[in-house]
Image (cartoon, grey):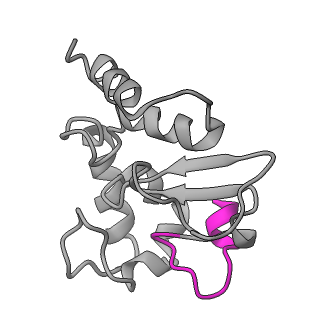
Amino acid sequence: MPFTDHRDPGSPEVQPVYQDGRIVRFANDATKAIPPTGQPWEGTRVLYLMHPSDPIVWWSPHLIFNKPDWTSEPPGSDVLGGIFWMPFVTFWQVTADLPFATGVPAGHGHKYTSEYVDGFNAIMQPAGITPQDLTDLRKIIAGEQ
């Protein structure tokens, strides 16, 4: 992805910062402050939700011959430690995970479900939305109501 490939120096691939977060930001939990915190996020906003365990986020044909930075970084909250890159092998491991990316609990893999509510709220910052409104919307989207 161009944004992660050209992320700000020093920002990890698992939580990249692109151009000081002026327009594009990344979050694995949109209920928390979205990095880079303390930086204004005015005007146009783009948010990428990406779980550390989402193979769709990490899949790329570049995995065949190129070691990605994320294999050398501290693993995300829902990723086992000890991941390492091997030419061809890592590509096929991530590829094999793709069909199962949504068959996981919410908040893992490619199952974002009600997290879209918090992402939308972070981007749009609508006036008058209460925490209870967000909770109710999360329940509706998760199919709990």
Q: Please give the name of the residue rendered at 67% of the width and 47% of the height, measured from the top-left corner.
A: 46
Q: Please give the name of the residue rendered at 41% of the width and 56% of the height, measured from the top-left corner.
A: 32
Residue closest to the eye, 138 or 76: 138
Compared to 128, does 11 lie above or below?
below
Quadrant assignment, res 102 = top left
Q: Label the magenta part by its dominant secondary structure.
A: loop
| The C terminus - image quarter | top left
Residue closest to the eye, 78 or 87: 78
Q: Is residue 129 left or right of residue 75?
A: right
Residue farthest to the right, as pictured: 43
**Residue 37 spot, x, y in % from top left:** 57, 69
Compared to 69, does 21 lie above or below?
above
Q: Please give the name of the residue rendered at 79% of the width and 45% of the height, measured from the top-left corner.
A: 44
Residue 14 forms part of the magenta stretch = yes
Residue 3 forms part of the magenta stretch = yes
Quadrant assignment, res 126 = top right
In this rendering, the count of numbered labels is 0
Q: Is residue 58 left or right of residue 8?
A: left
**Residue 73 spot, x, y in % from top left:** 39, 83
Residue closest to the eye, 69 or 107: 107
Write down the region rendered in magenta: 1-15
**Residue 19 spot, x, y in % from top left:** 75, 70
Q: Is residue 13 left or right of residue 144?
A: right
Residue farthest to the top, as pictured: 145
Residue closest to the eye, 140 or 57: 140
| The N terminus - image quarter | bottom right
Quadrant assignment, res 121 = top right
Compared to 4, does 102 lie above or below?
above
Q: Please give the name of the residue rendered at 29% of the width and 42% of the height, measured from the top-left corner.
A: 101
**Residue 94 spot, x, y in % from top left:** 34, 58
